[in-house]
Amino acid sequence: MAAENNKNKSGAAAAFSGIGKNIAEIGTTFKEGDWKTRVSYLIMGFGPICRGAFLRGFMYLFCQAGIISWIAMYGWKYLSKLNTLGTVETAKVGRKTVYGDDSFLILLFGLLSLILVIALIALWRMNIAENRKEEEILKAGKKLPGNKRDFLSLFDSNFDKTLLALPVLGIFVFTVLPIIFMICVAFTNYDATHQSPSKLFTWVGLDNFKELLSFGPNGFGSTFVSVLLWTLVWAFFATFLDYFLGMAVAILINKKGIKFKKMWRTILVMTIAVPQFVSLLYLMKMFAKDGLINTYLMKWGWIQEAIPFWTNPMLARITIIVINIWIGIPYLMLIATGLLMNIPEDLYESAKIDGATPWQMFRHITLPYMLFVTGPYLLTQYTGNLNNFNVIFLLTQGGPKSMALAGGAGRTDLLVTWLYKITLNDTNYKMAAVIGIMVFIVTAVISLVVYNMLPSVKDEEGFQ
Amino acid sequence: MAKNTSTSSMKQKRAVGNAIAYLVLIAISIVWLFPFVGLVLQSFRSYATEYGGMVEYFIPKQFSLDNYKFILSGESNYLLWYRNTVIIAIFVSLFQTIIVLCVSYALSRMRFKGRTFLMRFWLILGMFPGFLAMICLYFLLKALGLTQAGAVPGLILVGIASSGMGYYVCKGYFDTIPKSLDEAARIDGASRARIFFTMTLPMSKPIIIYTALVAFMAPWCDYVFASYVAFGHDTSYNVAVGLTRWVWTNDYQGFFTRFCAGGVLVAIPVVILFMCLQRYYVEGVTGGAVKG
């Protein structure tokens, strides 16, 4: 613990000394630099342009001009209101609608402007470093790399920039920005009664988190705990039942003397090939009150009344887990089949000579190997199942609903399906955002804790 | 003599074991195929003479093509949904493969500043539930005019924009291609881009097919986002949204058997494609599982 503290401190110290070093370098570059470099402090890229490196220089200049003009023309009016998220409500004066502030746009474009300002500062710093580098090269009596070489380097030593530019931009606009936005929403009162653009919403601090953990009659607390527990239990069963049963099926098909191995596998693989929504919806109907299973059981006189597969909470949960086994086994069977063949045959041979039973061989050879190799996979499977939307939603839509649960949650709702319902049915965006953050925390904590416990991480060479 | 009896008893034991194994396998096969057989059978149930909703028998009394005629005639938007899905799937598959290949190559082969930061950042980003971003994304798309009527290009955009984060399996594959090959080519004066296009890509056929196949199959099952983006605009639905609505809301009007017919038509091309490329799929899935 003490060592960790030290490490943290030294990390912070390193960061501070890094910043200090940067500032010092900015200063010395200005002091020692020529006039071209000094102008570059105001007009980015001026130095490189004067020295003939047009490509780099104009890139800096365009970035600066673009960002500053965007912020001046659009960004500023949002950025300046970011602290209140708008004060003037849209109102009707007589028959005319007078448009006020739009909290949604203020938050979104305010954040975007903020990020752009940070990007501008980073670019400015890079521009200074560029100037210094060029000056040093010229001082040493060497020539600057030409524009053509600069450009061609994008396909050689700087090929990573070419390859990653678009993907990183896409992820920024369509994942990073929305997630930052929603994290911010968790600290506002953006819900059905504060719907932009007609109504304003504003910062409320930690109120939403308090509401999520309040256990009063109107609070989300008990619902949250119940949904969270079911999410964890579901992910556990969905992961491990599938895993062991899938492995068992793979071993069965691999068994010596079994013919038509390929046919058995193909039959199972059908489940992967058929789009999930088709098979899930059909299964949902099959287990329904008037579905095939109930009607046939009644016809045969095995039961008197229809089994409430989807309306009894406990039964619904069990049915979902069973159907998920139907979906999950084929994947595990494929994976296990490939891996089982990697286990050296002579291990089994020598075990047999020692008189080991098949169960002993499985317990001491197959299982440890499989667990070792697929440890990380099991972890991603588990976190994936925490967010397994399709199975739950297409089968039960989270139902059966219960009056005891807040926010329209049902007995089989996972955190993510609940999040979806709160967003779509209640437009209670603030709580949806809070739940989303909770999902992240749960996933991150489980991943971190389990990852460090994995045998394949602890002991990488263990099984080679 | 003694040896003989022991081998024959062992043979017997093995035969019994195999018989049990076959029984289990047959039982498994029945359980796994039953829903699909049911789906196909009910899609042929006559709509004119029998009820199109839920009935209490398995095999239809009269086989007919009523349901197929209905969905293929212009009476519903099924063909439109089908076209939307195919368009989305093709574009997403194409561009997602390109992006994943680019990202994987950069992360596997190049060493640049911020590489580990980028990988860690994406890993953490992936722990947020995708739906969290949904609300904001919806408004972004709306601002671009890519919701409701424009939902198809909108879904394509969303499908490819963030695909760079799914690089794990592909990078794992690139990591197994020896680096010494790259280095030898670089000594001979080949640029990174040239190595990527003329050496790495031709060697990566299995992983390219795997990436494209997985990307192609995903849009067929996309219910959540598609229903949100195309909300209330019937002609922009994909098959998953359209057919799910048939089952949930129009069941009593006899749309169940029509759903079955629609489901069969959706499943056929995907299943055929999958079965042809199954080998690559297995390779990719197994490789991905081992590397985590």
Image: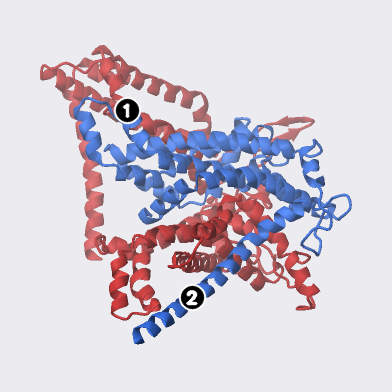
Chain colours: A red, B blue
Q: For mark 2, does the 10 Å Cα neighbourhood hold few (<14), some (14 to 19), or many (20 or more) residues?
A: few
Q: Which residue has dot 1 on it?
A: B193
Provide the chain ID for the residue under circle 2. Answer: B
Compared across the picture, whether A325 is left or right of A308 comes to: left
Compared across the picture, whether A415 is left or right of B71 comes to: left
Q: Residue at x 54, y 55 (%)?
A: A266
Q: Do labels 2 and 1 touch, CB within 8 Å? A: no
Question: Residue A310 occupies which quadrant of the picture?
Answer: bottom right
Residue B200 image point, x, y percent? 33, 35
In this view, which residue lies farthest toward the left?
A140
Callout 2 secondary element: helix
Compared across the picture, whether A435 is left or right of A251 comes to: right
- Quadrant (top left, top right, bottom left, bottom right) of the C terminus of chain A: bottom left
Residue A7 image point, x, y percent? 23, 57
Question: Residue B265 occupies which quadrant of the picture?
Answer: top right
Amino acid type assigned to the residue bearing label 1 in the image: Ala
Q: Which residue has dot 2 on it?
A: B15
Above/below status of B86 relative to A457? above
Provide the chain ID for the residue under circle 1. Answer: B
Q: Residue at x 68, y 69 (%)?
A: A404
Alpha carbon distance from label 2 to label 1: 59 Å
Q: For mark 1, does the 10 Å Cα neighbourhood hold few (<14), some (14 to 19), or many (20 or more) residues?
A: many
Amino acid type assigned to the residue bearing label 2 in the image: Ala
Asked if labels 2 and 1 share a chain, the reply is: yes
